[in-house]
């Protein structure tokens, strides 16, 4: 028997948006699931295929690093096919379009649900229900269907209907509080959307767990991944401290509660830095040797993390005076050679130039019909035996309408033409969708 | 019956990443046998936090959080009799998880080849800092170092200051979550094809490849040739981040220009929607727009509590939420109403709240069947009951330090 991908034969309907949901789906398609992304020409979902349906080209370079990520900073006539974020996490799936506002479009989704195994949905709770496509309806048509919903705040509770993004829930979870400059004003911590990554991995795990259970029960089910709750797991230690001692850990910048010295130190060149973290006395001796200060290594006043914590400010000055005149990649190599945990504070370009990631084949070259051959971050784990997929970046909007309507749903050319005339089938957003932004 | 009730896991992992991976499996029903070093156990038993800051190996908050629903046995892997126990358990298990430095298990004669020879259907998952291959394989790192090398740290914080680390252990948790999903993929394939697997999770690659923030920035760089900095990922004038109000801070995200009208209406200035060309493409990225937002937003916020802003934002359909400290998060009314935290009593640590389900299923899904095990609590049950060793054999193993 040839070696199949783990999810070979599993079909996923993808109703996801922004980052968290599409990433969860990417995990399933990496594992070999066949994914049909259900999109609509009548509605451009912001923050997914780019922020705006059609941004003014002159403002693109003034946008932030995530918003501006059009191939060569040029949105051209089809910006929705040219945005790096979606082209990366929307990889390896089919795209079909349908107007969900009409009964005819809703019937198409029902037909797809009947031939699918999993639905992935991170829309606001109840959104698909408005179109008569809630779990109950789809489950009645296909009792083996697994429906993974990822509401930010869950299906119940006082915030159920609140609008929220990852950054909001991180604040609520106590997460943002833990990430701060020492004594710093919380408004300086910048934005973070770690929750999207956390949800992405968590929802893929949830879908796989439900698939495992279905092998035994033969039944599908509704899985509710409340994004806030899933994220809270990752703050477990701080929550335990709060429960045990009634106290809130304050942000301590780049230091560690135990290890010392630890910090981000300046290097040669503007805005270049190195991260160093010393735990054991052997690591401390390695750092002292690298700095050419062997005497410091034998000094009993600097023996043990507790002693070094007490002198952390002075040590930081000493270390910074040394790092300041050196290249951060060279320092990283030197320190690692002496057994000291150290890493350059890499910029995006440094990560692409990293020899370790290169040697492991982490980055992938892939062809895309709208933007050509580009490099993408690759898999987050590897298998020795089963193959993982990384074939194509995200599909063009509506790229696989013929395949989905014709081959999968068995529509005749006449029916397909009719569906196209009634606005279901297309490869561009409607003028109205573009005007709405 | 919980979904993973028939899944048997031999857990050789410690610290954070591996234990979080096996916690995800155990919380959904898997039978996880955790192997710890005799006497000292998993190093996370010494991390704390501890009640009143008094160290105690059964009262570490990190260990208690990460090891729910598992059984603990103590085995000395450097002892031949100890290694025989591991090999016997590898025959019993469906899955083995470790996060040792690469090569450690192979050096002890417990490598994937040895285990697969005994049990060809075994799924072996190794989670490590840099993965099992490559030039950095044996480099030393903590989560702090890995986040820096993956580019996460450089874009965190403000441009005027040094880059800022994120929440401790974040990438290790992500590594554990990816380990769990990689294991389930292999378990599903094994059911159909009867084949085992060897999984290599590199936390460095998880940090570089997870979507936000790394994958988004890296793919953006590949498309534009521009490095991200410590700046708003969207740019422009609309609020994105943490803002001060009367009694604390609130996180506000107003991303697309289509939300201008709602945002101005929230501030009681709906009149400006017609007056200004706010829908004009590019207006949102102008200095005038930024000035307008600052002039209107800050005074409005400072007159209101974070709860009042939260309520007003939700009425206007603007995404916002207050900044909670961990103690406030524990008392968060929404989570209380959902019954999220599970109160449970541990024989030594006492009654504590535990984080609840990662996701909820129909029927039995997530459950807190048992709090974290005492060190070696299940030695007799596992070695005597499961492996059938006699009382005399157990005594001998104990005396020779094998367990």
Image (cartoon, grey):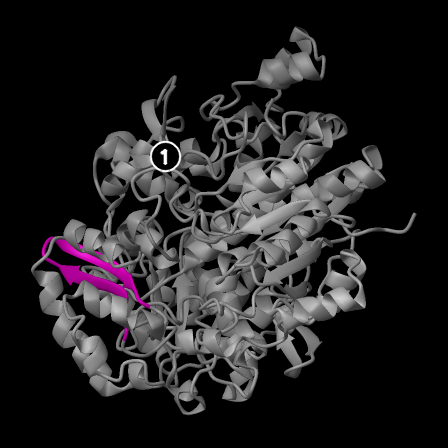
Seen in the picture, residue B74 relative to A398 is either above or below; the reply is above
Which residue: 29% across, 53% down?
Answer: A171
Viewer-proximal residue among B257 and A361:
B257
Percent across and percent down for residue A39 are 58, 64
The residue lying at 59 percent from left, 53 percent from top is A106
The answer to whether A76 appears left or right of B114 in the picture is left
Image quarter for residue A41?
A: bottom right
Quadrant location, the N terminus of chain B = top right
The kind of secondary structure element at disc 1 is: helix
Q: Residues within 10 Å of mark 1 (few under 14, many from 20)?
A: many
Is B239 included in the stretch rendered in magenta? yes
| Camera-side residue of B262 and A12 | B262
Residue at the right extreme, as displayed: A1
Is residue B178 something that shows in the picture?
Answer: no
In the image, farthest residue toward the left: B303
Residue A132 in the image: above or below residue B376: below
Residue shown at 62%/38% (left/top)? A139
- Depth check, front residue: B129 or B312: B312
Main SS, magenta region, reads strand
Front in this rendered view, residue B162 or B253: B253
In the image, residue B82 above or below residue B233: above
Looking at the image, is B242 positioned above or below residue A334? above
All told, the count of numbered labels is 1
Residue A120 in magenta? no
Is residue A95 shown left or right of residue B255? Answer: right
Give residue A89's position: percent from left, percent from top. Answer: 58, 65
Residue segment shown in magenta: B238-254
Q: In which chain is the residue bearing label 1?
A: B
Name the residue beneath numbered marker 1. B61
Residue A281 horizontal side relative to residue B382, left or right: left
Q: Is residue A32 left or right of residue A331?
A: right
């Amino acid at each position: 028997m040839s070696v199949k991908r783990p999810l070979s034969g599993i079909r996923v309907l993808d109703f996801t948006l922004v980052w968290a949901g599409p990433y969860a789906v990417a995990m399933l398609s990496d594992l070999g699931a066949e994914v049909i992304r259900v999109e609509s020409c009548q509605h451009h979902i912001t923050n997914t295929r780019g922020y705006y349906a059609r941004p003014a080209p002159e403002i693109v370079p003034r946008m932030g690093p995530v918003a501006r990520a059009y191939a060569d900073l040029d949105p051209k006539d089809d910006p929705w096919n040219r945005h790096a974020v979606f082209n990366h996490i929307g990889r390896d799936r089919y795209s079909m379009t349908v107007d969900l506002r009409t009964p005819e479009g809703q019937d198409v989704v029902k037909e797809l649900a009947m031939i699918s195994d999993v639905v992935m949905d991170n829309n606001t709770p109840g959104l698909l229900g408005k179109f008569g496509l809630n779990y109950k309806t789809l489950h009645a048509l296909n009792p083996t269907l697994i429906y993974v919903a990822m509401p930010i705040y869950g299906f119940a509770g006082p915030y159920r209907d609140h609008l929220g993004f990852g950054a909001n829930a991180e604040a609520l979870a106590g997460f943002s509080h833990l990430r701060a400059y020492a004594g710093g004003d919380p408004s300086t911590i910048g934005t973070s959307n770690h929750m999207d990554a956390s949800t992405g991995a968590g929802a893929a795990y949830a879908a796989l767990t439900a698939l495992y259970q279905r092998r035994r029960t033969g039944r599908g089910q509704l899985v509710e991944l409340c994004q806030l709750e899933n994220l809270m797991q990752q703050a477990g230690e701080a929550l335990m401290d709060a429960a045990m001692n009634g106290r809130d850990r304050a942000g301590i910048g780049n230091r560690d509660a135990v290890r010392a010295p630890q910090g981000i130190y300046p290097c040669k060149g503007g805005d270049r830095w190195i991260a160093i973290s010393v735990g054991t006395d052997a690591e401390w001796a390695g750092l002292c040797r690298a700095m050419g200060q062997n005497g410091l290594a034998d000094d009993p006043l600097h023996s043990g993390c507790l002693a070094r914590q007490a002198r952390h400010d002075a040590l930081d000055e000493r270390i910074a005076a040394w790092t300041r005149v050196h290249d951060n990649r060279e320092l990283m190599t030197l320190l690692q050679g002496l057994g000291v945990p150290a890493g350059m504070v890499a910029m995006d370009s440094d990560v692409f130039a990293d020899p370790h990631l290169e040697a492991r084949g982490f980055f992938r070259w892939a062809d895309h019909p709208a933007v050509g051959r580009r490099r993408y971050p690759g898999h987050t784990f590897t298998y020795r035996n089963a193959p993982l997929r990384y074939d194509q970046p995200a599909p063009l909007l509506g790229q696989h309408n013929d395949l989905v309507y014709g081959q999968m749903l068995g529509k005749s050319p006449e029916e397909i033409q009719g569906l196209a005339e009634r606005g279901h089938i297309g490869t561009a957003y409607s003028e109205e969708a573009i005007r709405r932004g | 019956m919980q979904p993973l009730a028939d899944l048997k896991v031999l857990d050789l992992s410690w610290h954070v990443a591996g234990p979080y991976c096996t916690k995800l499996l155990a919380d959904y029903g898997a039978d996880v046998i955790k192997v710890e070093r005799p006497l000292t156990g998993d190093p996370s038993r010494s991390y704390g936090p501890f009640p009143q800051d008094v160290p105690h190996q059964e009262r570490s908050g990190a260990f208690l959080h990460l090891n729910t629903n598992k059984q603990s046995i103590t085995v000395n892997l450097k002892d031949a009799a100890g290694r025989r126990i591991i090999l016997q358990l590898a025959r019993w298990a469906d899955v083995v998880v470790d996060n040792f430095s690469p090569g450690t298990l192979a050096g002890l004669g417990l490598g994937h080849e040895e285990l697969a020879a005994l049990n060809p259907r075994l799924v072996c998952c190794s989670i490590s800092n840099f993965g099992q291959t490559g030039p950095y394989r044996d480099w030393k790192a903590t989560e702090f170092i890995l986040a820096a090398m993956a580019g996460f740290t450089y874009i965190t914080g403000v441009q005027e200051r040094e880059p800022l680390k994120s929440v401790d252990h974040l990438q290790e948790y992500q590594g554990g979550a990816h380990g769990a999903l990689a294991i389930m993929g292999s378990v599903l394939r094994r059911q159909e094809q009867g084949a085992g697997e060897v999984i290599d999770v590199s936390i460095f690659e998880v940090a570089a490849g997870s979507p936000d923030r790394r994958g988004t920035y890296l793919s953006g760089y590949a498309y534009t040739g521009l490095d991200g900095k410590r700046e708003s990922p969207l740019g422009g004038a609309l609020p994105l981040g943490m803002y001060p109000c009367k009694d604390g801070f609130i996180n506000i995200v107003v991303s697309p220009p289509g939300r201008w009208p709602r945002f101005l209406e929230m501030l009681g200035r709906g009149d400006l929607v017609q007056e200004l060309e706010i829908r004009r493409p590019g207006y949102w990225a102008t200095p005038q727009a930024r000035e307008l937002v600052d002039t209107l937003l800050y005074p409005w916020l400072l007159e209101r509590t974070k709860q009042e802003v939260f309520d007003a934002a939700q009425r206007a359909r603007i995404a916002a939420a207050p900044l909670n400290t961990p103690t406030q998060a524990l008392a968060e009314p929404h989570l209380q109403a959902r019954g999220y935290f599970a109160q449970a009593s541990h024989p030594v640590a006492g009654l504590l709240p535990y984080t609840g389900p990662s996701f909820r299923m129909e029927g039995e899904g997530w459950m807190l069947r048992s709090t974290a095990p005492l060190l070696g609590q299940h030695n007799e049950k596992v070695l005597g009951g499961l492996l059938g060793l006699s009382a005399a054999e157990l005594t001998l193993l104990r005396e020779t330090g094998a367990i």
